[in-house]
Image: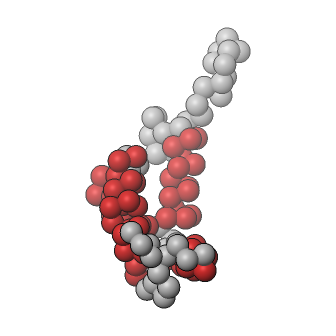
């Protein structure tokens, strides 16, 4: 963790190659625990609360509720990279929100 001279901490190396740091491993852990395990229940809950406030349509199908996470999984599988800010904005602003908002 520290260099030989007792200097500032260096990124700890993790399994998977010399360039993997703890931060990268935490990102992979996050993706595995949240994104790759579904997430439709969380999105459905968020959409139910939005509908109760009049912000989204009611009775949104589970498939539509999962759509942002499904598209995120698709990006991760195809590119093997975290999605760019632009990609996230496209998924939400141009695809998902027009489907669920009451008045897009």
Name, please, the residue furthest toward the bottom. Answer: 59
Q: Residue at x 32, y 61 (%)?
A: 94
Q: Residue furthest front?
A: 103
Q: Is residue 65 above or below residue 13?
A: below
| In the image, farthest residue toward the top | 5
Q: Which quarter shows the C terminus?
A: bottom left
21 lies above or below 2: below
Residue at the extreme right of the image, as rendered: 6
Q: Nearer the viewer, residue 20 or 81?
A: 81
Which sits in the foreground, 53 or 1? 53
Question: Is 36 above or below relative to 49?
Answer: above
Q: Is residue 26 left or right of residue 87?
A: right
User: Which sits in the foreground, 90 or 33?
Assistant: 90
**Figure coloring:** secondary structure
The image quadrant where one finds the N terminus is top right
Residue 85 x, y percent position in the rendering: 40, 46
Percent from the top left, x then y, of residue 48? 57, 80
**Residue 22 at x, y percent in the picture:** 58, 41
Q: Position of residue 24 (x, y in %)?
A: 51, 43
Q: Is residue 66 left or right of residue 86?
A: right
User: In this rendering, would 15 be left or right of 4?
Assistant: left
Q: Is residue 43 visible?
A: no
Q: Residue at x 46, y 45 (%)?
A: 16
Answer yes or no: is residue 13 visible: yes
Q: Quadrant of residue 98?
A: bottom left
Which picture quadrant has residue 76? bottom left
Relative height, residue 46 to residue 33 (above, below) = below
Q: Residue at x 44, y 76 (%)?
A: 102
Task: Report which quarter residue 67 is drawn in.
Answer: bottom left
């Amino acid at each position: 963790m520290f260099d030989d001279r007792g200097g500032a901490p260096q990124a700890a190396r993790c399994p998977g190659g010399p360039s993997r740091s703890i931060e990268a491993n935490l990102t992979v852990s996050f993706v595995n625990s949240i994104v790759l395990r579904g997430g439709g229940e969380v999105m459905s809950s968020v959409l139910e609360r939005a509908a109760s406030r009049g912000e989204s349509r009611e009775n949104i199908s589970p498939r539509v509720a999962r759509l942002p996470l499904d598209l995120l999984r698709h990006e991760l599988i195809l590119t093997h990279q975290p999605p760019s800010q632009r990609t996230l904005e496209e998924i939400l602003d141009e695809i998902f929100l027009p489907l669920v908002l009451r008045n897009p």
